[in-house]
Image (cartoon, coloured by chain):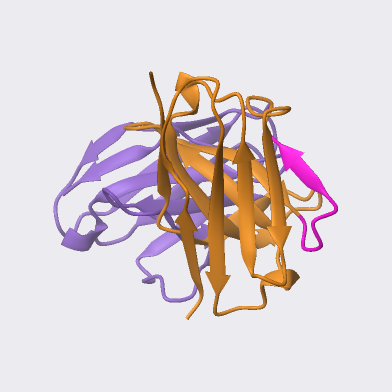
Amino acid sequence: EVQLVESGGGLVQPGGSLRLSCAASGFSFSGYWMHWVRQAPGKGLVWVSRINNDGRSTLYADSVKGRFTISRDNAKNTLYLQMNSLRAEDTAVYYCARAGGCSNAGACWFDPWGQGTLVTVSS
Amino acid sequence: DIQMTQSPSTLSASVGDRVTITCRASQSISTWLAWYQQKPGKAPKVLIYDVSSLESGVPSRFSGSGSGTEFTLTISSLQPDDSATYYCQQYDTYSTFGQGTKLEI
């Protein structure tokens, strides 16, 4: 069974840091691009970042560029999101998602998604 | 950035009804469009990708159509389990989602 399990969320003060992890199983992790998508409480879905299969190419939403870093360890079948300089507006459930298929420009639809991990930025 | 606008924002319907949700893109996205279903407290689940391709395991009462800037998700005969929020997503350039349509049955 294909499975993605996020961890690492929690309460952090503004300006703080947090690292999220996403453990993948049931598929050949190194063969897929991976993404992070977030959802603020009661709000819609927002794409955050993506990484290609060997980790050499990354892309970020403007709202997190320069503060967040996506990475992966294919030997451990794990995706990461290092989040620095956190702001209140970063409060959200963070989902990792596998690329289902991608357009010519390298943007993708997502399948499956993990269950999500909640990040709360508050003093 | 490509903006995605869904309508309606909320929709109330009955079991057996046929419902349609519309998604408009601020510029042409060819056929790079997906639809997701999300139930409270759960992760989104893809229903349709590439405008009209049904994801494996998704009931055939779900269908998608459109091209360019206007797209629709149709549920042909509503079931109680279809109560959820539905999102469209463009993946022509980067990735953006519509604001969601909450379907109440």
Q: Give me the residue at 50% from left, 60% from top.
A: B48
Q: Give me the residue at 34% from left, 32% from top.
A: A41
Q: Nearer the viewer, residue A2 or B94?
A: A2
Query: What letter labels the chain drawn in orange?
Result: A
Q: How many marks?
A: 0
B88 relative to B82 in the view: left or right: right
Q: Give me the residue at 56% from left, 32% from top.
A: A17
Q: Which residues are magenta?
A: A52-60
Q: Is residue A99 visible?
A: no
Residue A49 vs B2, above or below: the answer is: below
From the top left corner, tell me how far across and down residue B66 is, in percent. Answer: 57, 48
Q: Give me the residue at 72% from left, 68% from top.
A: A74
Q: Colour of chain B?
A: purple
> Is residue A55 found inside the magenta-colored segment of the image?
yes
Residue B104 vs A26, above or below: the answer is: above
From the top left corner, tell me how far across and down residue B41 is, in percent. Answer: 28, 49
From the top left corner, tell me how far across and down residue A98 is, in percent. Answer: 60, 61
Q: Nearer the viewer, residue A74 or B54?
A: A74
Q: Nearer the viewer, residue A75 or B73?
A: A75
A118 relative to A59 in the view: left or right: left
